[in-house]
Image (spheres, rainbow, N blue to C red):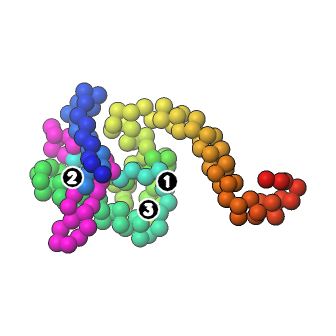
């Protein structure tokens, strides 16, 4: 996937990179960052991993942290900027819940909410949430219509609810 770099007057002094991939070292796999926000005046870069949910198994949470640290090291070596990481659980407004959901792999300074991310990117969080809510009913209908196309699912539903014919 190709990285997308955005520099815009909406975010003065910031450069945003989406889907940055960095090479692995000594036979290791490449690492990637969902979002990198570079603030050139402050000589600072923040590597952000964006997730929709907020609960992960220990192995997944550890892998996310390891991946982010590799990207942080790579960027810091090349830019000479202070770098930090932020694990964003977009739909979880409580940072303590994000920390628990990531099995304590991140501290309070390393987690952010969707509202925090939107503030950094100059995006209206409420407008995004409104659009997502509007899509929920359509998404649910699409899911149900398609799952009911699976004969085994229809059979189970008909067994559980004999009064209903699908």
Residue 142 placement (x, y as % from top left): 62, 45
User: Residue, x 83% and y 53% (percent of image)?
Assistant: 165
Taking the view exactly as shown, the residue that stands out farthest to the bottom is 27
Q: Is residue 119 magenta?
A: no
How would you rate the neighbour count of disc 3 (Cα within 10 Å): few for under 14, some for 14-19, many for 20 or more?
Answer: many
How would you rate the neighbour count of disc 2 (Cα within 10 Å): few for under 14, some for 14-19, many for 20 or more?
Answer: many
Question: Which of the two marks, 3 or 1, is nearer to us in this view?
Answer: 1
Sequence-first disc among 3 and 1:
1
- Of residues 74 and 22, the one nearer the viewer is 22
Q: Is residue 47 visible?
A: no
Can you identify the residue that label 1 sits on?
53
Residue 99 placement (x, y as % from top left): 43, 59
Can you identify the residue that label 3 sits on?
102
Structural distance between the alpha carbons of marks 3 and 1: 10 Å
Structural distance between the alpha carbons of marks 1 and 2: 25 Å
State the image quarter where residue 5 is shown: top left
How would you rate the neighbour count of disc 1 (Cα within 10 Å): few for under 14, some for 14-19, many for 20 or more?
Answer: few
Magenta stretch bounds = 22-44
Residue 162 placement (x, y as % from top left): 86, 59
Can you identify the residue that label 2 sits on?
83
Task: Specify whether 39 is left or right of 89.
Answer: left
Q: Is residue 5 visible?
A: yes
């Amino acid at each position: 996937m190709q990285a997308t770099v955005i520099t815009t007057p909406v975010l003065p002094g910031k450069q945003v990179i989406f889907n940055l991939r960095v090479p692995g070292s000594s036979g290791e796999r490449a690492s990637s960052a969902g979002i990198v926000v570079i603030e050139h005046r402050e000589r600072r870069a923040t590597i952000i991993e964006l997730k929709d949910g907020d609960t992960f198994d220990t192995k997944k949470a550890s892998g996310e942290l390891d991946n982010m640290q590799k990207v942080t090291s790579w960027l810091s070596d090349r830019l000479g900027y202070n770098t930090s990481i932020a694990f964003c659980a977009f739909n979880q407004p409580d940072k303590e819940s994000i920390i628990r959901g990531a099995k304590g792999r991140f501290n309070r300074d390393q987690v952010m909410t969707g509202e925090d991310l939107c503030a950094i990117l100059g995006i209206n969080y409420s407008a995004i949430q409104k659009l997502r809510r509007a899509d929920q009913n359509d998404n649910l209908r699409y899911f149900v219509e398609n799952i009911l196309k699976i004969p085994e699912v229809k059979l189970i539903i008909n067994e559980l609810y004999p009064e209903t014919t699908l």
